[in-house]
Image (spheres, rainbow, N blue to C red):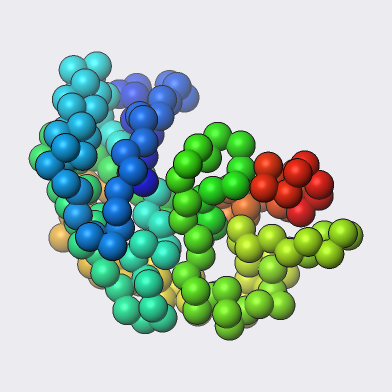
Amino acid sequence: TLAANIVPTNPNDTERFNVDQIDVDLDSSILNQEQRNQFNGWLRLAKEAVFQKIAINLWWRFIEFEEGKYDFTYYDEVLSLILRHGFDLVIEPSFHTLGGNENDGNTAAALPDYIVNNFEDEFFVSELNNKSYEYVSFWSTEKVQKHYSNFLEALAHHYSPIADRVSKMIVPVGPTGEPRFPSYNPNQDKTAA
């Protein structure tokens, strides 16, 4: 799913709005013409509203399907569309999952399989023994730090040619990108995660 936040011209204005989501088949790694037209339409509307920046999540799994193998095809296309419309970027490399929480809609982005498989014991577990695969637990950060670093280095290297158009990088931490413990997810019937 492609979703973006549009950030207003005035940097002191905290108002943001989310554009609708476009369901994308990530196996194809590209937007089809209908999706491209829809996204371009949103970008034109944002430009007419005098917005200057687009904030977009760069989901870890969508770039690193296998450990150490990076495929930027999808985001190359999306970011080039954004840049062609004259926007600057606020990028959010996302080390958490998308899906199963309030306001996630029908979207889903899991962590890379190799993280889940290699760090099975490093996820949050509740008092009810429910394991949450939303985010590697905070006390295990050191164990996965090299994978976070490798991913960020790959992003920085790949997107260095457009670095002057990135006005900010936000690295969300924790489940849903928030520094909190996972709990009360709809997929767990409101029971603590």
Q: Looking at the picture, tell me which residue is in the foreground, 180 or 39.
A: 39
Instruction: Give how far across and how far down residue 10 sits, in percent.
Output: 34, 22
Q: Spot the residue most to the top.
A: 49
At 57% from the left edge and 74% from the top edge, which residue is drawn?
Answer: 116
Q: Is residue 108 above or below residue 133?
A: above
Asked if one can make out residue 112 in the rendered structure from this viewpoint, the answer is: yes
Image quadrant in which you'd find residue 72: bottom left
At 12% from the left edge and 42% from the top edge, which residue is drawn?
Answer: 33
Instruction: Give how far across and how far down residue 91 sits, in percent.
Output: 36, 49
Instruction: Give how far across and how far down residue 127 sits, in percent.
Output: 88, 60
Q: Is residue 97 above or below residue 112?
A: above
Image quadrant in which you'd find residue 186: top right
Instruction: Give how far across and how far down residue 180 sits, in percent.
Output: 70, 49
- On screen, residue 116 versus residue 52, left or right, reads right
Q: Please state, as top left, top right, bottom left or bottom right, where the C terminus lies in the image.
A: bottom right
- On screen, residue 189 versus residue 91, left or right, reads right
Asked if one can make out residue 144 in the rendered structure from this viewpoint, the answer is: no
